[in-house]
Amino acid sequence: MSYEGVIEQSVAGLKELVEAGEEIIGYIYPHVPLELFIAHGLTPSLIRALPGVSSGFEESLQTFACSYIRNLYSQRANGQFLTLAGLLFPGNTCDALQNLGDVWRIRFHDDRVLRLTYPVTRYNQDESTTKFLAEEIRRLSDKLFKTYNRPFLTEGYDGAVDLVQDFRNGAQFLYSARVVNPRLISYSELVRLVRNFLTIPNLSSVSEIKESMAVVQTAADELSLTENIESVKGAILTGDYSRVKLPDTLETPRIVIAGGMVEPQAIVSLMNEIPDFTESSIVLDFLSFGFKTVFTGAPSKSDNPFMAMAKSVLSAPGEPTHEGLSFRMNAMRGLLSNLSIQGLIVCEQSFCDPDQFEAPSIEKAACELGVKTIRVPLDSELSDRGRIETRIQSFIETLE
């Protein structure tokens, strides 16, 4: 299915829920406790940039606003946004996102704007980071109760933990299957399944992932690859690659896509236009809307719910903290050096300071391992598509 087709499908499903009277809370930053909203009887839905949306330098936004933020703002200003019960903006992640929430509250005063503030560090010897985020999640819970008159229900929370973990278990297996043999499931199909769940996290979207997992598992069993897949999944979750078993023969080149808030489906759309390129070359992504969301740990039901959700959010491979760079680079080194990766494509969201600041560290870490890299600046509209395709094609030729 095309990029536009996937968007149409997910938006259509969301419209049906809105028309049926469901209260949808849109969220923009991917590291959120989905379980919290579901426990309050609300449906969380990840809001993404849309291709084809014209986003200029609106006077309401600061000059440092990235193309992703301008796209979101333009959707709302142009009447392309669904009527949602509320929008959750992050605090303390980047200046542009925080500014967008402030501007949104003033410019679109009929919208209900919520905020979740994240810690700046992941260093956690005294659990101060986790306690800080747990308290912010508790405050958000109080706000949801006061705003929507929907209390936090323990039964709803327990069911939400199971639902989200079922999604992650299936998606983690599918991601790991592609590392072992990318032809077991296409990258476009995998990211479509992930997008569908993050747009509407319900039993239907989880069932679809489970069905795909069953098909892939059957194919893997026939090829005697299930043990390999489980070893990769366990290694990614624990960071211990000592027991990873890859097949003796691997199709090359093997490429990883890295970056921040970049749409995986847009990457598929971009790559499919490159002559003689197949999706099987993309072994893994390290994107916020894909891998980083999928490999987040589950909250423990035996812990205080707010502490458990805070620990879960902070366990994401690209955790939402400013001072986690060394942790992120070590995690990436483990992936690149143990999964037989030859090339790394670093996608930089245009005008995104976090992407620009982190890209040199990613490039340096890959270079130390002998993994070739290319940095590709892009925006949500892929406005410079021809030049980007040419650069990536040349890069792939060097790997071959």
Image (cartoon, grey):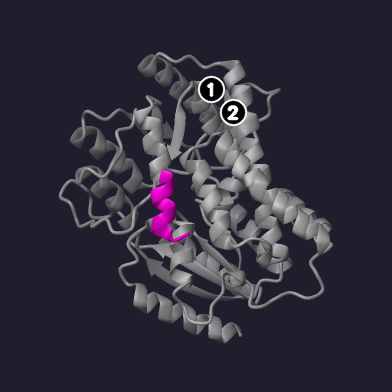
Which label is found at residue 39? 1
The answer to which quarter of the image holds residue 248 is bottom right
**Which structural element holds mark 1?**
helix
Chain-order first, disc 1 or disc 2: 1
- Crowding at dot 1, Cα within 10 Å, few <14 / some 14-19 / many 20+, comes out as many
Residue at the image position 54 percent from the left and 75 percent from the top: 373
The answer to which quarter of the image holds residue 364 is bottom right
Residue 9 within the magenta-colored segment of the rendering: yes
Which residue, given by chain and number where applicable, does mark 2 sit on? 160
Residue at the image position 35 percent from the left and 30 percent from the top: 19
Is 115 placed above or below 286 here? above
- Crowding at dot 2, Cα within 10 Å, few <14 / some 14-19 / many 20+, comes out as many
Is 249 placed above or below 87 here? below
Horizontal and vertical percent position of residue 41: 48, 21
Distance in Å between CA atoms under marks 1 and 2: 7 Å
Mark 1 residue type: Ala
**Which structural element holds mark 2?**
helix
Q: Where are the magenta residues, as a range?
A: 1-10
Question: Disc 1, disc 2: CB below 8 Å?
Answer: yes
Mark 2 residue type: Ala
Horizontal and vertical percent position of residue 52: 29, 59
Frontmost residue, 8 versus 56:
8
Is 152 placed above or below 334 here? above
How many numbered callouts?
2
